[in-house]
Image (cartoon, rainbow, N blue to C red):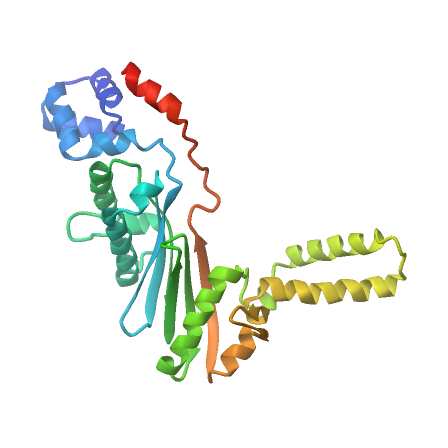
Amino acid sequence: MFTAKDVMALREMSGAGMMDCKKALTACEGDMDKAMDYLREKSLAASAKKAARIAAEGIVSSYVTDDHKVGAIVEVNCETDFVAKTDDFKALVNDVAKLVVEKNPADIDALMALDCGDGTVAEMVTRAVAKIGEKITVRRFARMESQLVDTYIHLGGKIGVIVAAKTADAEKAKPAVHDVAMHIAAARPNVLHRDEVNPADLEKEREILRAQALNDPKPKPANIIEKMVEGRIAKYYKEVCLLEQPFVKNPDQSIEQMLKDHGDVELTAFVRFEMGEGLQKRQDNFAEEVMGQIKK
């Protein structure tokens, strides 16, 4: 009915995957034109052609249950900031965040395989790619359950934070925990408390500080250098440990002290996403793009 060469030819024409092309040719009894239409109807051709493009824009969004016991933040990427600001893209990201809360997937693969009422999440994204016209990638998510969970989204989705806490009075603690989420967005802590600092990172910091002290124009005894190093390590803890950081709204207080003023509140976890961190950014050359369109 059709050969491997036919599958390869359809793949070149459509940009769709090999198995999708084989399925299309099987469904269309080897008719290449009908198979191409089949792929277009399924949105596979359009989305596959975009798969190699760079998606480093996008937004971080969140969803929290009404009782604030379960919440999630997700990062979904697209190719341009323009698309990231559209209602269609925002709705997609919000839907994904809600599914993470409701279904509790183990990882991205499990999330993409979830049934969302009209096919899987992967199929929902594929339809969005066909409609929006850009590559879309669900990059990562964080989900938390606790006595109190809150989130904070900054700058329209450029930064997202989720915080979990234990408390005897969730309603009373909610403003303080929300303040902590906003603080995390601004202060960028690495860990919750000093016990979580990576020992290798700590030793590296000590080595740098010792080298700085030894290079000081005024030589100091070894015991003085060690005291200086430990003093600077205490400062380092205040930079990277959330509970020891000066509270952005009142730098005279640490986060730990601020929480004590609000009763029985114990932070148990936090995650901070900055949209696009670590991703390769797309480099556009407008002149080349225009010339490319002219030549077509």
Q: What is the quadrant of residue 244 in the picture?
A: bottom right
Q: What is the quadrant of residue 15 in the picture?
A: top left
Which residue is at 42% across, 34% downward? 282
Image position, residue 181 (x, y; %): 44, 66
Labels in figure, total: 0
Q: What is the quadrant of residue 144 in the picture?
A: bottom left
Q: Is residue 128 found left or right of 197 in the rendered image?
A: left
Which residue is at 20% across, 53% downward? 116
Which residue is at 36% across, 32% downward? 53
Eyeballing the image, is 261 above or below 62?
below
Q: Is residue 39 found left or right of 69 in the rendered image?
A: left
Q: Is residue 125 found left or right of 77 in the rendered image?
A: left
Which residue is at 40% across, 52% downward? 158
Residue 43 can be seen, yes or no: yes
Image position, residue 165 (x, y; %): 43, 74
**Where, quadrant-wise, is the C terminus in this rendering?**
top left
Eyeballing the image, is 68 above or below 221?
below
Image position, residue 261 (x, y; %): 50, 83
Image position, residue 184 (x, y; %): 49, 63
Q: Nearer the viewer, residue 200 or 126?
A: 126
Residue 145 can be seen, yes or no: no
Eyeballing the image, is 107 above or below 183?
above
